[in-house]
Amino acid sequence: MRVLLVGSGGREHALAAALARSPLLGALFTAPGNPGTAGLGTNVPIAADDVAALVAFARAEHVDLVVPGPEAPLVAGLADACAAAGIACAGPSAAAARLEGSKSFTKEICDEAGIPTARWERFTEATAAHAFVRRRGAPIVIKADGLAAGKGVVVAQSVAEAEAAIVDMMEHASLGGAGSSLVIEECLQGEEVSLFAFCDGADAVLIGAAQDHKRIGEGDTGANTGGMGAISPPPGFGREAQERALDLLVRPALAVLARRGTPFRGVIFAGLMLTAQGPKLIEFNVRFGDPEAQALLLRLQSDLLAALVAMCEGRLSESGLRFCGQAAIAVVLAGRGYPGEPATGGAITGIEAAEAIAGVRVFQAATTLDAQGVLRGSGGRVLSVCARANTLADARDAAYAGIARIAWPDGIWRRDIGVRALGCSA
């Protein structure tokens, strides 16, 4: 099969590595890709959100399957454009992708399906949002209604912090149009986990679960980011609990979407809070998470490409998904200054030395090769140093040993990824 993978991050490098292992694969193209994906196939200089150019390339190269990585092209209608061109796409239609494209749409689906979630209201006017926050108090969660690259959520611990977020998103338009409408909801208490499943419009097959570390600072402090690390599986949330959560929170949403005439086909990512009253939905995403994908895919034992084809063809029961029982961890290295303006241009060496450690794999994201072939950081989240081992403690030790072999003066990373899950301190 000829496959076009869309995206350029660590998630896409991990997907490319999994796809490259498939005996079904004939050719792999990644648009736009990064130096890591270039070693597994052919990079194509097309932006991930340039839907017309992606479909034109897929038609010209006789691509059999398009595999979207990020959410933006899906919300922009990539799957619909592929369908019109007669090309299979392992992602949902734009109508179904509203699960991620609009927080208020997801809340409406939850209400219709009876899915447990936080109490919420939507606001399009700042004065009303301020009044609501003053009335409800804190802690409270402020969410940009639209896509904000993982940066549109503020868990405000005070009314002042909540009001500052409203001013920032609505009045200063820090997130562009994404923050012109806000969802403000109660702050759920508990342990946060991420649940993933393949969906074919009617059925859902569990992929697994992971736990992200969103904050930039150790001890879960500082600003929210796109994700600074992940572990899989999360402690205390085993296979049976994951299946129950799928029944409670995911399958009812799929049923509502199907009734509305917009069936969901693709990867669904449910962010959950494990509360004292049981699991509640925080949000839906319509793709693999990053860096959760890096940790999850390290544990994949079966053929990812075969599973994606089965999903597209409505044969999920035949997908044969298998994950090993080992633990995996991903630790993100970002450019100094992230999630603000990151340092860029610094040389990165030592990846091969890191990957010489048993179980360690390094996935690239915001990297470039200069004219001399030197790898350099070029953005915010730059590397995911990952490891798999029999225990989380062993995987964690291996990943941080890998980081110690990488030389990158501009790099920052959290030193406590997985620590809380182990019940210890860094």
Image: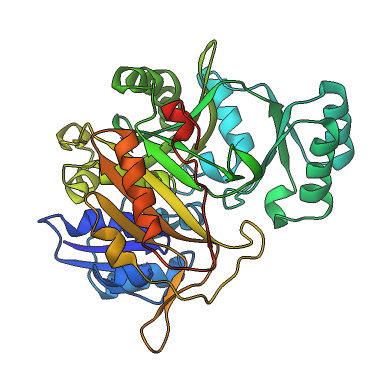
Residue 411 visible to an observer of this rendering: yes
Instruction: Using the rendered view, name the quadrant where residue 324 is placed.
Output: top left
- Residue 260 to residue 4: above or below: above
284 and 274: which one is in front?
274
Quick one: which residue is furthest to the left in this view?
23
Query: How is colour applied across the structure in the image?
Result: rainbow
- Residue 301 to residue 335: above or below: above
Q: Is residue 143 left or right of residue 135?
A: left
284 and 252: which one is in front?
284
Instruction: Using the rendered view, name the quadrant where residue 144 is placed.
Output: top right
> x%, y% of residue 60?
28, 75
Residue 92 visible to an observer of this rendering: no
Quick one: which residue is furthest to the bottom in this view?
371
> x%, y% of residue 265?
35, 41
Question: In percent of the image, x 47 and y 66: which residue is there?
Answer: 366
Q: Is residue 234 left or right of residue 28?
A: right
Q: Is residue 379 left or right of residue 202?
A: right
Q: Is residue 402 left or right of residue 348?
A: left
Q: Quadrant of the N terminus?
A: bottom left
50 and 29: which one is in front?
29
